[in-house]
Image (cartoon, rainbow, N blue to C red):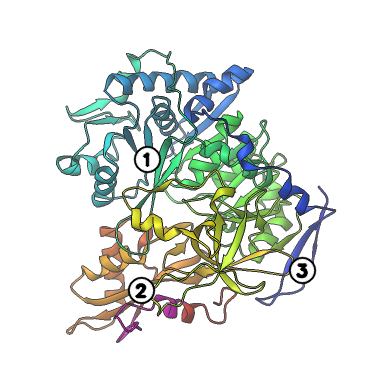
Amino acid sequence: MSENIKDTEKKDAGDIVVITPMEFDYEKAWKSMNPWDNIPVYFNIGYASTDAVVKRGLGKKVAIYWENSNGDSRTVTYDDLTRETNKFANVLTKLGFGRGDVLLLRMSNLVEFYVAALAATKVGGIFIPTSTMFREKDILYRVNDAKVKVIVTTPQLVDVVDNIRDEAKTLEHVIVIDYLGEKPSKPEHLSYTKLMAEASDEFESVRTRNDEVSFIAYTSGTTGDPKGVVHYHRYGIAYEYLARYWYNYDTPDTITCPAEVGWLLPVSSSFLYALHRGMTIVLYHEMGRFNPEKWFEMFEKYGISVFIGTPTMYRMLLTVEDAEKRYNLKRWREGVSAGEPLTPDTMLRVKERFGIVIRDGIGMSECMVYVHNMPGMPIKAGSCGKPGPGIIIELMEVPDEDDEENEVPLRPVKTGENGVLCVRIDSHPGMMKEYLNKPEATAKVFRKDDNGVDWFYTGDVLRKDEEGYFWFVGRADDVIKASGYRISPFHVESALMEHPAVYEAAAVESPDPVRDKVVKAFIVLNPGYEPSDELKKELQDWVKKNRPPYMYPRKVAFVTELPKTQSGKIKRRQLRRLEFEGTPWQL
C-alpha cells in the first residue's frame, strides 16, 4: 500500500496529522460484512482452535513459538496443541471438572496457559485469566465470586493460592506446573507433569452452543469489588471484523502481543482471535521490564509480521537506536495499538523509522474494540478511527456529575460535541453476557434510548468530527486508564486510606510524557503529619505492597481539602480536568 504523510509541519496540540493512502471507501467496508454472519449455532472455542485447525491440514504448522528471559524456548505445532489440550481435558474430567465448572489461571506467558484455557472450554467449562501481580485478596475474591473449582499455577506463584485456600469455599484442586527448575512442593499440590503423563491424548470436545459461557475476564469498576465480565464461546469468531479490518490478519502471519496473558488484550488478539485461524503466535515470558532490544531480536528471529501493543510499548521500541538498520524487519507489516490513546508524535515517529502505520482503536473488556482505524483508511493521527464493519455506534449525552441519583436518558449529541460512546447491542455478537452476580451493575450499562433500543453504555467520552472520525476525550465515570491498565480509583484510595497518615485521598489519571497517563493521588493528611518527599515515597511503597504494583500513584499531591458534591462524593472529574488543562487531552 502506498501511503504519504500530510500536514507534518503542524506541531500544536490541536493540529491534525493525516496519513493518507491512495484510496479507500469506508462506507463500502462498513457494509461489507455483518459480524453475525460468521457465527454457527454450535461452536466450541477449544475445539475450533485445535482439532478443527488440524482437520484443515495445518497440523504441522507452528501454533506457538515460546521463549523466556532465561533463554528457554519451545516450539508447539497445532498437532502438539491438540494433543496437549486433549490430555488436559482428560485430566480435568478425571478430577470431576465439567460443564459449567470454573478454572482460574495464575501464571505468566506460558504455553500451559493456552493449554489449560482451551482444555477447560473443550469439557464445557469456563476459564478465568488473572494477572500475576494480583495478591491474596484479588485471587480470593475471584475464586469465591465465580465459584472456582480448579486453579492452575506455577511454583513461583502458588504461595498466594496456598494463603487463601482455607477461605476459598469451592476450590477443590490446585495444579502446579514444573517451571524454572521448581516443582510442586506440598502434598496438596497436584503435579501438572504427572497428570499429563498419565492422560490420553484423545478427547471428544463437548458440543457447546455459541452462546454458552467460555471465560470470565475481571475488570475494575469505579467503586467496590471487581466485576466479572462474562463472555460466550462465540467470542473468538465474533470479532472477525477486527481480524480483517483492524489487525489485518492473514493465516501465514506470525503475530505477537507482549502484554501478560492475564489481561484481555493478549487473550483476545494473540489467542482467541488467532488460533482458530491457524496463525502462528510468538509468546514471550519477560521476567522483568519490557526489553525493546530483545523484541527487535525476536522480530528478526521469528519474522513477526503483526505487532499488537500499547502506545507505551511503541514508545519504548523507539528508544532503540538504529533498530531499523541493525535488525531485519522486512516481515513486519502491521502495527496495532490499544489500551490507551495513541499520541500523534508516536504514530509519526514509528511511521518515519519503520514504515509502519499504527492503527489505533478503542474498546473495553465488556466489548472489545468497536471503533478503530482500518487498513487503507486515511488516518488522522490521534483519532481512534471509525466504527468497525457492521457495528452501530452513537455518542450520548454526558451525565452531570452533580446529578448523582437520577439515571440520565440516553440521548444522542450533535456532531462535534462530547458524548458517551454507546454500542448498539444487537449489532455486536461479541458483547458480554453480563457482570457475574451483579445485576444492578449490568443494568447500568445495558440501557435503552428514548425509542426502546438497547445500548451498551461504555462510559468513554468521545467526540465525532464532520468526517465521522472519533476522538477519545476521557471517562464519564472515574476509571483510570494508565499504561494500558484500567484502574479503579477506589482501590488506590482505599489502600492509601489504610495508612495512618492519610485522612482522605482521591486518585485520578494524569498526563505523562512517557506512559501517556499515570495515576495521581491527591491526599489530605491526618493531624500530626506533614508533607514531605519521604512520606510521598512511603505512601507509594505502601500501595505497591498492598495492591497490585501497577496501581501505585506515580504522582502525589498533598492538599488541605478535596472538592466534593453536595452529598459528599469526591468530584474526581474536577481534579482530572485540572490535571489536563493546557494539554492535548484537555477535557
Q: CA distance from mark 3 to mark 1?
A: 45 Å
Quadrant the C terminus occupies: bottom right
Relative horizontal placement of residue 198, taking residue 9 as reference (left or right) = left
- State the image coordinates of residue 163 (x, y, percent, origin top left): 18, 43
Name the amino acid type tagged 1: Ile
Residue at which label 1 appears: 128
Judge whether 384 appears above or below 125 on screen: below
**Furthest-right residue in this view:** 22
Name the amino acid type tagged 2: Glu
Q: Secondary structure at mark 2?
A: loop
Observer-side mark, 3 or 1, equals: 1
Q: Look at the magenta stretch and give its main secondary structure.
A: loop
Range shown magenta? 558-576
Observer-side mark, 2 or 3, equals: 2
**Furthest-front residue in this view:** 451
Observer-side mark, 1 or 2, equals: 2
Residue at which label 3 appears: 8
Judge whether 557 appears above or below 252 on screen: below
The answer to which of 241 and 277 lies nearer the viewer is: 241
Q: Secondary structure at mark 1?
A: strand
Name the amino acid type tagged 3: Thr
**Of the image marks 1 and 2, the number of the one nearer the N terminus:** 1
**Of the image marks 2 and 3, the number of the one nearer the N terminus:** 3
* Residue at 44%, 42% in the rendered image: 231
Residue at which label 2 appears: 405
Relative horizontal placement of residue 423, taking residue 414 as reference (left or right) = left
